[in-house]
Image: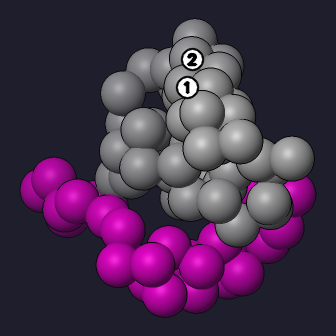
Amino acid sequence: MAGTIYTNIAEKRRILREIYGGMMTLTDVARELGRTRDVARAWVRGLGLGTQIGKRVYYETDEIAKAIVQGRGMCA
């Protein structure tokens, strides 16, 4: 069972990297969550995710993939 979550994370990471590359914007995160930007902002802040580059904050695709899989219980 433990291998399943890692497999799911790897698959989600692969999919997100194909779409967004290595970094995602808040709009990208909101799209993946199916939520508004405000909800996405609260979600990433709650998880402590985000890297400031210049004046903008970006989110590492790998970390977003991991958080989505773990948060949705996609390990079954």
In depth, the one of 33 and 76 nearer the eye is 76
- Residue 65: quadrant of the picture: top right
Q: Quadrant of the N terminus?
A: top right
Q: Secondary structure at mark 2?
A: helix
Q: Quadrant of residue 16?
A: top right
Verify whether residue 40 appears in magenta: yes
Q: Residue at x 22, y 59 (%)?
A: 51
Question: Which span of residues is magenta-colored?
Answer: 32-57
Would residue 47 be counted in the magenta stretch?
Answer: yes
Q: Amino acid at mark 1?
A: Ala
Numbered badge on residue 14: 2
- Between residues 56 and 48, which one lies in front from this camera angle? 48
Residue bearing the label numbered 1 = 10
Mark 2 and 1 residues: CB-CB less than 8 Å, in contact?
Answer: yes
Q: Is residue 44 left or right of residue 71?
A: left
Residue 62, visible in the rendered structure: yes
Instruction: Give the percent coordinates (x, y) of residue 66.
Output: 53, 49
Residue depicted at x 36% and y 68%: 49
